[in-house]
Image (cartoon, rainbow, N blue to C red):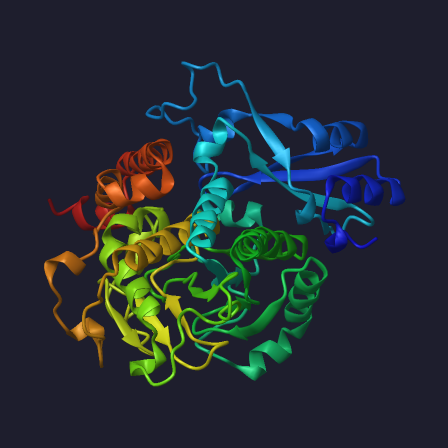
Amino acid sequence: MQPRQVKSARDARAIVAERKLAHVKVGVFDVDGVLRGKYLSTKKFLSALEKGFGFCDVVLGWDSNDQLYDNVAYTGWHTGYPDAPVRIVPESCRPLPWEGDGLFFLCEFAPPAETICPRAILRRVLARARDMGFEVYAGFEYEFFVFDETPDSVRAKNYRDLKPMAPGFYGYSVLRNSVHSDFYRLLLDTCETMDLSIEGLHEETGPGVMEAAIAVDTGEAAADKAALFKTFAKVLAQRHGKMATFMAKWSRDWPGQSGHIHLSLRHAGKRGNADKSAFYEAGKAHDMSATMRHFVAGQQQLLPEILAMIAPTVNSYTRLVPGFWAPTEATWGVDNRTCALRVISGSDKSQRVEFRIAAADSNPYLALAAALSAGLLGIEKKLSPSAPVTGNAYAQKFPAKFQLPATLWDAAQRLKASKAMRAALGDAFVEHFAATREWEEREFRKHITDWELARYFEII
C-alpha cells in the first residue's frame, strides 16, 4: 500500500505493519501555522488511531518563539497546561523521503480545543459551504527567499548581510533555474513524492527568491498541502545547507513575499447543476455569475475585519505598501494585480478569484477560512461589490470603508469587533486569536529597531 492510498484507521494500521515501523511521526499545526509534532511508538500510534492521544496544550498557549501568552483564556498557568485531546487524520498519511520507509500523519485538536484549532476552524467553514450547496477549490502560491546560510550562520550574523542563493533581479530566469536545477529538481521531486504537487516553479524578482504554485485541490486538502509545503520546503533547504524564509518582508530593499490563494466554488449535489462552476456564467460581464459577484463583494466588504487572519504578524504590514505588488485597500479588478482581489475570467474550469492580499507568513488554514467565510457571507446576503478597478489601484482613492488596518493591533481590534466573524468562526476562536495578535504586537513594542537607533541615538 502507498501512503496516499491510506483512507481509514484500518489502512493506517495496515501500512504501518507492512513497513514494520517501530515509530511514526505525527504533527499538528498551531495558531501561527507552525507544525508541532513528535515520534510515537507503533504501539502508542495504533492506540491513538482509535482513542486519540494527549498533546500538551501549551502549543495553543505560546507564540512562534515558545513564549507563553499572558492574555488567553483557554490555557495558561491558570489551567496548569494540561494535555489537550488530539485525533490522528488517517487520510493525511505521507512518506518522508529522507527517512526510509518512515511515515508522517497530520493530527487535529479534538473538543474542547477544537474550537481554536486552525484546521478544525477551516473544516467548520467548509461544512458551511457544503450546506449552501458548494464544493470549495483552492490553490496556494508562495514566494520564498532561499539563502546559502544555516540556522547557526544567520544567528551569528544577527540576520544581516545574508548570502542569497543567487544575486540580482532575475524574474522568470531560465539561466537561474538551470544553474540551480539541482535544488529546483529536488524540491519538485520531493513535493511530488509527498503529494504536494507543484504546477509551476520559477525564479521571482529578487536575490534567491522563488515562487511555487501548488496544484489546486478541494478546500481541506489544499490547505493541508500549503501548510505542509511551507514546513517541508524549509526542511529540505536546511538539509542541503540552505535556508528558506516565508517572512512577509525580510528586507526593505526587496519586494515582500505573497501567499496568494486562488478560490472557486462548484455546485455540489444540485440536480442538473452538479459539479458546474458557481462562478462562471457566459455572457455576463467578465463571465461572472451573480454568485461570484456576491462572493467578491463579501470578501471586499469584510477584508478590514479579517485582515489579522491573513496578515498575522507585525512584519506582515511592512509588505502592504504601494508599488510593491501588494494591495493597500479592499479593492477588486479583472486581471488587475494592483488590487486585493483579482477576478480571473475564463471558463467553467478556470473562473476564479485570486485573494492577493494574503502573504507567505499567514497560516494557510486560517487565511482560507477567512477568505471563504467572507465570500460566503456575501452570497448569503446577496451583497454587491463596488465598480471594478481599472488601471493602477495604488494611484486611486477609495472610500474609507475600504481602507485596511495599518497595524496588527488595529487589525486585531477589527476582528474582535466583527459580528460576522464571530458568527462564522465562533466567539472562542475570535477571542483567542485576537488575543494572540495583541500579544504579538506587545512583544514587538518591547524592542528597539535599528531604524530608531540610527535616527535618534545622536541627534535627538
- Residue 166, given in percent of the width and then of the height, sits at 53, 71
Identify the residue shown where x is 47% and y is 73%. 204
| Tally of numbered discs | 0
Looking at the rendering, in which quadrant would you find the C terminus?
Answer: top left
Q: Which of 252 and 412 is in front in this view?
A: 412
Q: Is residue 83 left or right of residue 277?
A: right
Extreme bottom residue here?
A: 283
Is 237 positioned to the left or the right of 326 in the image? right
Residue 298 point in image, percent of width and height: 28, 58
Residue 79: quarter of image: top left
Q: Which one is nearer the viewer's eye here, 407 or 105? A: 105
> x, y (%) of residue 200?
56, 74
95 on left or right of 341: right
User: Could you tell me which residue is drawn at 43 percent across and 61 percent down?
Assistant: 259
Asked if residue 207 can be seen in this view, the reply is yes
Can residue 325 be seen in the rendering of this structure?
Answer: no
In the image, taking residue 206 as reference, residue 225 lies left or right, namely right
- Residue extending furthest toward the front: 271
Above or below — where is 96 with respect to 16? Answer: below
Q: Height in image: 203 above or below 403?
A: below
Instruction: Name the residue: 68% across, 48% down.
Output: 91
- Rendered image quadrant of residue 185: bottom right
